[in-house]
Amino acid sequence: MKRPRHTRSSLFLIELIISILFFSVGSAVCIQAFAQARLMSQAAEDLSFASARVSGAASVIRYTDGSLESVQRYLPSARQTDGGYQICYDRDQQPCTQEEAAYILSIQTEQEGIRTDAHLVMTDRDGEPIYELSIRYPAPTRSDQGGSADESE
């Protein structure tokens, strides 16, 4: 009985298969890491966009009388809803219609005596909140809204 002799070429082939397997596993891990980094980058971009828009809208709500006309002076795409306002933004973070919206900024205000409470929330298209802000401030008085030149000294 003769035993077949293993040649060097079969050993080389096994080494080559093992090294291809090793690099395949390594590349799969790298691709997964890059995909996760992309998702984290998008989440950070969304959070930055949302916080800037919500903070700006909070300033508008705080320093205007809250009427649609005064709010639209600073936020032209705002539309009135029950108890507040809504602004829609598309994927490129530009104001848009509700049908094209990827982000929705909702502003709810409630006045109690001399105090006004406002709750602002930016959500994605699925309704998941990205950024929320609640503010409480005294109701604006005539002097807070920049009275006439005769009132200043």
Image (cartoon, rainbow, N blue to C red):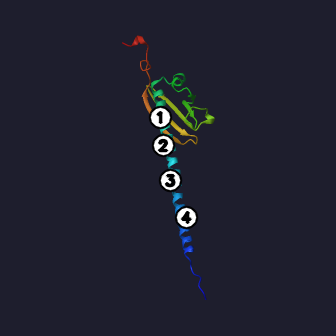
Q: Are marks 3 and 2 in contact (CB under 8 Å)?
A: no
Spatial distance from mark 1 to mark 2, Cα to Cα?
12 Å
The residue at 56%/77% (across/down) is: 7
The type of residue carrying mark 2 is Ala
For this orientation, the residue located farthest to the top is 150
Earlier-in-chain disc, 4 versus 3:
4
Q: Nearer the viewer, mark 2 or mark 4?
A: 4
Q: Are marks 1 and 3 in contact (CB under 8 Å)?
A: no
Residue corresponding to mark 2 = 44
Give neighbour class at mark 1: few <14, some 14-19, many 20+ (Cα, 10 Å): few
Give neighbour class at mark 3: few <14, some 14-19, many 20+ (Cα, 10 Å): few
Left or right of residue 4, residue 36 in this image:
left
Q: Camera-side residue: 26 or 48?
A: 26
Earlier-in-chain disc, 3 versus 2:
3
Tell me the SS state at disc 1.
helix
Spatial distance from mark 4 to mark 3, Cα to Cα?
20 Å
For this orientation, the residue located farthest to the left is 153
Where does residue 132 sit, x and y in percent of width and height? 48, 38
The quadrant where residue 81 appears = top right
Residue corresponding to mark 3 = 33
The type of residue carrying mark 1 is Ala
Spatial distance from mark 1 to mark 3, Cα to Cα?
29 Å
Q: Nearer the viewer, mark 1 or mark 4?
A: 4
The type of residue carrying mark 4 is Ile
The type of residue carrying mark 3 is Ala
Earlier-in-chain disc, 2 versus 4:
4
Residue corresponding to mark 1 = 52
Residue corresponding to mark 4 = 20
